[in-house]
Image (cartoon, rainbow, N blue to C red):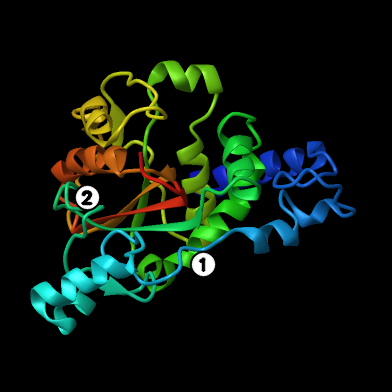
Amino acid sequence: MRSARSMLAAARSRVLAVEALALPRACLGCERPMPDRRSGACCELCRHRLRSIAPPVCRRCGQPIDQWSLRLAAEAGGEASGRATLGRGAGAAGSGPCAFCREWPKELAWAVSGTWLDEGPARNLVHALKYGGWRIAAAPMADCIRAAGGARLGRIDALVPVPLGATRLRERGHNQAALLARALGASLAVPVLESALRRTRETRTQTRLGPDDRRRNVAGAFEAAGPSLTGLRVALVDDVLTTGATLGSATTALARLEPASVGAVTFARALVPA
């Protein structure tokens, strides 16, 4: 008798096969024709146009650090101390918050994003998955995260997608973070714990809110709903990181399940935190 996991995997394969047949012969990143459907959702040119987060970056949150900040850090604590807060890649361990992540809860140990949310392929893929319902877009997005995550992703035990509120879930018919987590989980061969968190209330869209308003908007918006995560190294998954307010609130709730550590991965990072 087939196991529940194998039956679920087979069902997902059938869904992806149907989507591949229905996919227009055009790239979801640039809308140019693609001669071969086997290329998937995104052409090679668009994959190369996804702009990675270049160092130097904060080892904890992955946000680039400008030369002025480096100089201040060196003057305040010596050059070695300044360098200690930086990472040359996603695999480096965190050693302290920068100005970008200093308001994050201490339980959120690290964050990695695959690309900048530039106009073009990155934004088009986010919109295709989030609003267009193109589930197949999750695959190239997950590939981008995996490339940026490096050794950190090799050390996690499970993925937890940031949940949507019930109203938005009904409107869209899917949670883009869950679709992204499933694609990444399949690539990494780690489980996706979609029931670990749930939203306790609907929140306003964050698009036009500043950092303080974002934190207030999502404060207490999540609660732990799954079994204990004791001893597990987990990573939250979302499509876009702007200020980290949503990830921070989700982490606070997830910490009640007592995981060994909590990190976060997103496909894209907003160019200018607002």
Q: Is residue 157 above or below residue 73?
A: above
Visible residue check, residue 263: yes
The answer to which of 273 and 153 lies nearer the viewer is: 273
Question: Which disc number belongs to residue 87?
Answer: none
Mark 2 Cα-neighbour bin, 10 Å: few <14, some 14–19, many ≥20: some
Hey, which quadrant is residue 62 in on the image? bottom left
Hey, which quadrant is residue 24 in on the image? top right
Disc 2: which residue: 229
Q: Quadrant of the C terminus?
A: top left
The answer to which of 259 and 271 lies nearer the viewer is: 271
Question: Which disc number belongs to residue 147?
Answer: 1
Earlier in the chain: of badge 2 and badge 1, it is 1
- Horizontally, is 79 left or right of 181 in the view? left
Marks 2 and 1, Cα distance to the nearest angstrom? 26 Å
Visible residue check, residue 93: no
Give x and y (percent) for residue 184: 50, 54
Secondary structure beneath dot 2 equals: loop
Q: Residue at x 30, y 37 (%)?
A: 246
- Horizontally, is 75 left or right of 211 in the view? left
Q: Which residue type carries mark 1? A: Ala
Q: Which residue type carries mark 2? A: Leu
Give x and y (percent) for residue 75: 13, 75
Give x and y (percent) for residue 195: 34, 36
